[in-house]
Amino acid sequence: SVKVSSSANCSSTSPVNVSLTSNPLPNAAISSVGSTTICSGHSVVLNATSGTNYIYQWQFNGANIIGATNAAYSASVQGNYTVSITTNSQNGCTATSAAVYVTVNPTPPDTVIASGPTTFCDGNYVVLSTNSVAGISHQWLFNGAGVTGANSSYIYAYDSGAYAVINTEGNCTSTSGNVNVIAVPLPIDTIIIYGPPVICAGTTLLLQTNVVPGQTYQWLLNGFAIPGATSFSYPATQGGQYSVAISNQGCTTYATPLSVSAPVGPSPVISFAVTSAGVTLYVPNIYATYQWYYNGNIINGADGPSYLTTQLGAYFVIVTDANGCSGQAATFNVYANTGVTNVANNNNIKIYPNPATSVVNIDAPHPVNVSILGLDGKVVLSQDNTKYIDISHLANGTYMIKVFGQDNTLLKVDKLLKNDN
């Protein structure tokens, strides 16, 4: 009931009793799943007190968040968060929680910058760098794995693969995207030859290098490009320093120069000596190998510096020097008119000087006839009834001198060397 009193001490009491009911307020509080200090781009889940038939409304910095009417809210923006809880009854009561402050720390930048092209020739490198800011630590990755000791704001990338960096500031980290680096392998730059690096007269030396699809080649002689020499091989015909430039995907390497010699090949000259046994042909004993031929055919076993002829005909010898180069002597003809097999070479007859430059003396007990023949057996000079013969007009070289008696009997045969020097 209600009693009403006036200032004159008059009062009256209502005859009706009124009953009042006190409904409890909901327990409005916020808890978080994890720390309320988060990194940019992340969020923290805020949970309101749960209860039967509770109605929720979340606020950010005092203003309702539209649509945020669940018991939980995912907060990603820095500021104060509260929640109002209303009991779902006829006389619903509302309570608002204390504010929870969410701190959002910035995520460190994760940009990677290359100092130059990320495709380069093997042996070179590119510098990859990220933001160098105080308080930020770094860890570089190569193909997804941490690189030991790579904790600077940059890294020298030498090898092919994927590079990235993890930047950390406080509890916040960021991982950059991959930067793919390609180190193009350099071509193999070997020069291959089969045999010694020597070019004999009239021959070639085949130079080769490795054949790899996609490679290009340029041969060089003494440091200069050889026009048209762009194959993997080159037939060298002259001496010098040879190299080859091999290119692959823009990368070029040069082979170590190969020194090739082109020596003057041997030029053997056949000399002869006449004895009672016959005509012995010989060349200087300065060569590595010898092979004698008779009428164009190999004489089996005739592989020394001299050969005693047994038949009339054409003889020559092929020699090989220490460099492996060969040379053939001019053909020496042994003729029947040499009378070699019938001459004992009269020791009473002296022929001098030998070598001679102009005059050859024949010291014999009686006048003689003299003939001088070339190595081909042909007479180039003759004089009868004489004790000397003038050879000044003959060319330098080796000749054969024959001495005959007055009855044309062959008395002596010898080699004669004409030499003006």
Image: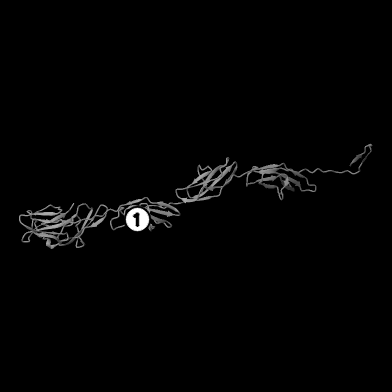
Amino acid carrying label 1: it is: Leu
Left or right: 175, with 75 as reference point = left
Q: Nearer the viewer, residue 335 or 378?
A: 378
The image quarter in which residue 312 lies: bottom left
Point out residue 254 in the picture as x, y percentages from the top left corner: 39, 51
In the picture, the quarter occupied by the N terminus is: top right
Point out residue 66 in the picture as x, y percentages from the top left corner: 72, 50
Q: Nearer the viewer, residue 276 or 76?
A: 276
Q: Nearer the viewer, residue 334 or 404?
A: 404
Circle 1 residues within 10 Å: few <14, some 14–19, many ≥20: many
Q: Nearer the viewer, residue 25 or 195?
A: 195
Point out residue 128 in the picture as x, y percentages from the top left corner: 52, 46
Point out residue 346 in the picture as x, y percentages from the top left corner: 7, 55
Left or right: 292, with 365 as reference point = right
Position above or below: 76 against 226: above
Snapshot colouring: one colour
Left or right: 226, with 86 as reference point = left
- Number of numbered labels in the structure image: 1
Answer whether residue 253 is visible to the viewer in this image.
yes
The image quarter in which residue 31 lies: top right
Position above or below: 24 against 352: above
Residue under numbered circle 1: 207
The image quarter in which residue 4 lies: top right
Answer whether residue 311 is visible to the viewer in this image.
no
Left or right: 355, with 325 as reference point = left
Label 1, secondary structure: give it. strand
